[in-house]
Image (tube, grey):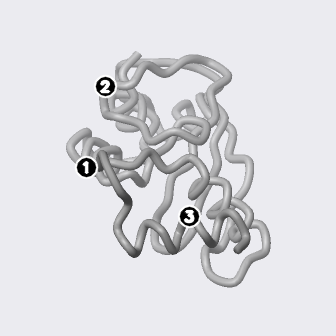
Amino acid sequence: MRLDRWLKATRLFKSRSGAKGACESGRVKIGRNRAKPSSPLGVGDTLSITRRGRITFYEVLGLTTRSLPAAKARELYLEKEVVEKKGSELMRLIERAERQNIPWDRKGRPTKKERRIIQKIKGR
């Protein structure tokens, strides 16, 4: 099932276009990977959604393509944890893990900024 349809059906986003925009801007992830709006979603997947400086983790418990009443929509996911973005030790660990999985968009030599990030990850 498409991720953007599921996000709309479960009422995590008001509209499908809002869910699509969040996916395209990298605020929605399946596991540790950035998710596209058309990414396949299955039962048992873990989502993380970043909103207003908070990361919320969800576990997918069920699938549907139709919008449901709010009470039934909440049965399709389990909200695991909310992490404040600023200053949290857990948030620093999450950011560090994400930086290690950055796929470089460029080919060839890294820029000065990219070299500094690489040095920081390697602990130099």
Which amino acid, by three-letter code, is at mark 3?
Ile
Q: Up-down: is 53 above or below 27? A: below
State left or right for residue 69 relative to residue 45. left
- Residue at 43% in and 19% down: 40
Q: CA distance from mark 2 to mark 3?
A: 31 Å
Q: Quadrant of residue 8?
A: top left
First in residue order: circle 1 vs circle 2 = 1
Q: CA distance from mark 3 to mark 1?
A: 29 Å
- Residue at 30% in and 45% down: 107
Which amino acid, by three-letter code, is at mark 2?
Ser
First in residue order: circle 3 vs circle 1 = 1
Mark nearer the viewer, 3 or 1? 3
Q: Which residue is mark 1?
A: 21
Which amino acid, by three-letter code, is at mark 1?
Gly
Q: Which residue is mark 3?
A: 118
Q: Give the image location of residue 19, x and y in percent.
A: 32, 44
Residue 14 in view here: no
